[in-house]
Image: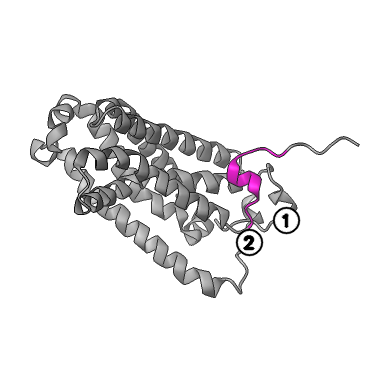
Amino acid sequence: MNAPDPRVPSAVPGTPVAPDAAVAPDAAAVPRTAPARRAGWWTVTALAFLTALFTARYLTLDPEVFLDQQRAVYLAHRGSLVLHVGGGVLAILLGPWQFLPWLRARRPGLHRSVGRLYLIAVLAAGTGGLLMAPRGLVGPVAPIGFTGLAVLLLLSSALAWRAGRRRDLLRHRAWAVRSFALIMAAATLRIWLPVMDLAGVPFDQAYATAAWTCWLINLVVAEHLIARLPGLPPAARTGRVPAAPPAG
């Protein structure tokens, strides 16, 4: 759904926004921004698909596809692994479609249905991640990093759901961007590790840093995109509720 016009009274920070309060961006800005947004969407979607394709191999539970250092752990915790990988694959495939303006505007029912399925997938991925993280490599640095990722993924997704339920579409969009940025950490991780390997960084060092950089980098990008959302006031970006005006 397109961002509401800040001139509309219902777009005041902290006030739920009705669906019909949304308006299209300024026409003069469309020619400059639309091609870049389409290119960005296709790039992210391609990365999401490739990551899902690569990661889905783990669902076969074939020991040969597991990381050598983690093979015994994965085999001993198949349930947590399937929960984490299965939820992550589904969430990363569904996420890009939630950011299509025409889908939000023309098929709001489908948008909500896909959103609910995405939240279920995130719940599975985050829960599985919390169960698997303590058993990860290069402790305690990497396990703490991946635990932080799982916690923030669940938290941001819950806040996006709550804002949507309250029809607070401004905060809903901001938290949804953060949630998907954290799911896309799976893609960033698989870019970071080969790059570090080519740079000659030892695996343990690369893995320990990847446990943090894979989601910190994505959150920085997410905050940049949120700051550029048209009509989104500062309170909606941060989630803070503005103070009430003084009486009288």
Where does label 1 land, which residue? 8
Q: Dot 2, how many residues are within 10 Å of its Cα: few (below 14), some (14-19), or many (20+)?
A: some
Q: Residue at x 46, y 49 (%)?
A: 220
- Residue extending farthest to the left is 64
Q: Position of residue 241 (x, y in %)?
A: 67, 37
Tags 1 and 2 touching, CB below 8 Å: yes
Residue holding disc 2: 23
In the image, is residue 235 part of the stretch drawn in magenta? yes
Residue 96 in sight here: yes
Can residue 112 be seen in this snapshot? Answer: no
Task: Please tell me whether residue 108 belongs to the stretch shown in magenta.
Answer: no
SS at mark 1 in the image: loop
Question: Magenta residues?
Answer: 231-242
Marks counted in the figure total 2
Q: Quadrant of residue 213?
A: top left
Horizontal side, residue 24 vs residue 97: left or right: right
Amino acid type assigned to the residue bearing label 1 in the image: Val
**Direction from residue 204 to residue 227 in the image, left or right:** right
Q: Is residue 155 left or right of residue 124?
A: right
